[in-house]
Image (cartoon, helix red, strand yellow):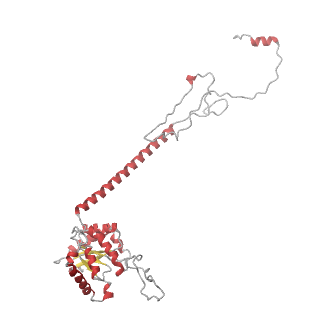
Amino acid sequence: MLGPYADVVVINVSSPNTPGLRALQGKEILEKLLKDVVEERNRIAVDGLPKIAVKVACDLNEEELGDVAGAVRSSGVEGVIVSNTTIRRQGLGLKSCKPLPPFLDYELISANQSQVGGLSGRPLFPLSLIALKTLRPLLPPSIPIIGCGGISTGQDALEMAKAGASMVQLYTSFGYRGVGTPRLIKDEITAQLSTTKSSWKKSIGSDYKDGKMGWTDEDRFKKTNEALKKEAEGLGELLKNLSDKEDTASLVRKAEEALRRFKPPQPRDNLLGSTTDGGPAPTSETSESQKPTQTITSGNVGGVPALLESVLPAPAADFAPIVAEENVQPQPQEEVDEWKQTVQKGQRRLV
């Protein structure tokens, strides 16, 4: 609707006063939104299509600003405005505008600092400048940045230019300096540039020594490749560790299956040496060579020292005859005649 009548269309995804709006600054969501807007703009049947700029917040961290830069580069958006209002309150030096009693030698903190909403004006300037300095090297010089947030003097505007802003945007300062604020700031800029024999164009990005405002394709690709390489190495190490754990778990499972198939000898259940399965007990006449033997060998399996030692059953039972002692009460001896004693002591014959 407005495209045919506008020179620049600004996409505001950073106002804190609209619930959920700032969520659109995420990389994937913002990239899709910007691409859709660019495609729709390109359908306008007029000569001289309007430029598209996106306005972001100064509350984004370095990683989030990097996501914004990536979405801008890939979508074809022509510019960025840094920044919108802030939701931060701490560390901004907010002071009360109420007059203080003469006996107080300190300044009161504003009672309004806990109010919800975006904060604009002078306290916003240092935050906007930091966001600008963070974002500028992430975009090529062909994509201009408009400095915005807390600009109220010509010195503020020049600091934005030196940090890489091609233009500046004003709003809150109109309420403090009046409708002539743009003229006043322009005169202040001119006065300062005349002392250094410079110009606004020369001031843009002058804080950077390379003339490209920190943007270097070769260095950027190199850093990106190094980051991807480290990430790939980390994933490879993770997969290796997972594979090692799976191999160890497989060995443990095999050992447990082998132990379940192994049946140790049944223990004796009486003094005579018989077994629970009803088999005959070994006698004293059993030779050593006929005694059953069983040998279990455990060792290093799959790099796990003595893996089976902790789960093997007790050593095989000893099948040596068990001598059962029984307390027998002495019986009274019967009178035996001499002939009977002679027969018992003599040689025995088979009959």
In the rendered image, the quadrant that contains the N terminus is: bottom left
In this rendering, the answer to whether 63 lies above or below 325 is below
Numbered circles on residues, count: 0
Quadrant for residue 186, please give it: bottom left
Residue 122 place in picture, x, y as percent: 35, 81
The percent position of residue 200, horizontal first and vertical second, equals 21, 78
208 in relation to 311, above or below: below
Quadrant, the C terminus: top right
Which residue shows up at 40% across the image and 46% down it? 244
Query: Where does the image place residue 277, in percent across and percent down from the top left?
Result: 60, 33
Mark yes or no: residue 120 visible: no
| Position of residue 285 in the picture relative to residue 8 (left or right) | right
- Please determine whether, in this image, residue 269 is positioned above or below residue 43: above
Q: Nearer the viewer, residue 260 or 13?
A: 13
Q: Residue at x 33, y 53 (%)?
A: 233
User: Residue 54: x and y, percent?
Assistant: 28, 74
Quarter assignment of residue 321: top right
In the image, taking residue 288 as reference, residue 187 lies left or right, namely left
Residue at point 17% right, 77% down?
48
